[in-house]
Image (cartoon, rainbow, N blue to C red):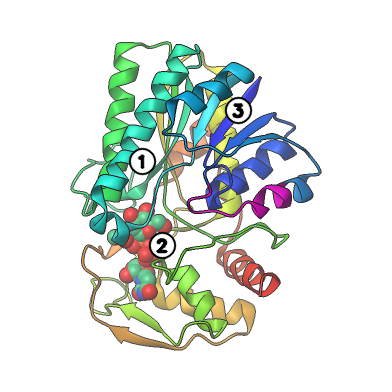
Amino acid sequence: MAILLPGGAGYIGSHTAVELLNDNKEIVIIDNFSNSNPSVLDKIKKITGKDFKFYEIDYTNREELEKVFKENKIDSVMNFAGYKAVGESVQKPIEYYYNNVCGALILLDVMRKYGCKKFIFSSSATVYGNPEIIPITEDCKVGGTTNPYGTTKLYIEQILKDLYTSDNEWSIGILRYFNPVGSHESGLIGEEPQGIPNNLMPYIVRVANKQLEELSVFGNDYDTPDGTGVRDYIHIVDLAKGHLKMLEKLNNENNGLFIYNLGTGTGYSVLDMINAFEKSTGETVKYKIAPRRPGDIATCYADPTKAKNELNWKAEKGIEDMCKDSWNYIVKNK
Ligand code: UD1
């Protein structure tokens, strides 16, 4: 029985693939390399010393997707094939709704046809919009997303809830990621944003690496201890391990729909991140204070208690590992 990973060559998918293989799970990866590189596949094999099946297909192509289900015994699916660039989603809403929402629908429909009803979905803290309480618990109100990317996450969550209501033989895990950073300690796989990065950590490492001139700190007048935005950064390997714990729960319980925050429970400001990066790497990050970025909120961090109690999962790596491993990936891939 295999676990299917659409988007398994991407940032979160590849790190989860490594953890699954290390745990002796059988996986099948499909990817169209729209935001990833074919060389990642060999790197996953190199890190784990394990092999897996791969199909270069677009997960929205129903016929090709069905072929994968016909040729393999797929028991569960972890979907990493979503587009994720916030700014781009504003420019290309049709592409985002099509790939993320239609893609998820096609995938779920094909899964149903082949009797596979175990699904783990990569959601995001973005579904909480401007959160009503901090730290954020899973029962906080969702909605008020500020861009099409975030709205696709919200819509897919709703589709999954409706699907489970209609047929409670499904086992569904919704994982709301906070801010994934870092990379595998080998430095072989990591985050490869296309063009100029939007997210903080990829920008910091490129400034330190002199690929970008200086970081703009978007706003220092928020209602936070130092005025800059506060987020819950989580090491990608911890995040990947959360998927194994989620799968374990889906395998142990016969069915159900479960929602968990995957975060550390600690908030760091933009200036905290710059300081932590400089301290743990010895590099300098040139920055200036710039106006607020539209759509940003002041503070967002998780209450991760539910995942700890019910999944027996908790983030182990701290801010120093996150910074060191983000830097290590850049240094190793110069
Ligand atoms: C963003 C997305 C979120 C997505 C997440 C993925 C928005 C509004 N939200 O979250 O939907 O799930 O990425 O990781 O874009 N910052 C700077 N300078 C920069 C970049 C960022 O000061 O060049 C600041 C931001 O203002 C924010 C913090 O750093 O306070 C983190 O930003 P970012 O890494 O983009 O993540 P989020 O905005 O939290």
Q: What percent of the width, then of the height, locates residue 315?
A: 56, 50
Taking the spot 73% from the left edge, 60% from the top edge, the residue there is 186
Q: Is residue 16 magenta?
A: no
Amino acid type shown at disc 1: Asn
Residue for badge 3: 3
Q: Is residue 63 left or right of residue 95?
A: right
- The residue at label 2 has a CB less than 8 Å from ligand 1: no
The magenta region covers 33-44
Per the image, label 3 sits on a secondary structure element best described as strand
Alpha carbon separation for disc pair 1 and 3: 21 Å
Residue for badge 2: 267
Q: Quadrant of the C terminus?
A: bottom right
Task: State which mark lies toward you, 2 or 3.
Answer: 3
Q: What percent of the width, then of the height, locates residue 230?
A: 35, 66
The vertical placement of 194 against 81, above or below, is below
Q: Is residue 65 left or right of residue 71?
A: left
Q: Nearer the viewer, residue 248 or 113?
A: 113
Tell which residue pokes out farthest to the left in this image: 144
Q: Quadrant of residue 175?
A: top left
Q: Quadrant of the N terminus?
A: top right
Q: Mark 1 and 2 residues: CB-CB less than 8 Å, in contact? A: no
Taking the spot 52% from the left edge, 82% from the top edge, the residue there is 211
Q: Quadrant of residue 49?
A: top right
Find ligand 1 in the image and state its quadrant: bottom left
Marks 1 and 2, the one that precedes in the sequence:
1
Task: State which mark lies toward you, 1 or 3.
Answer: 1
Q: What percent of the width, then of the height, locates residue 13?
A: 56, 45
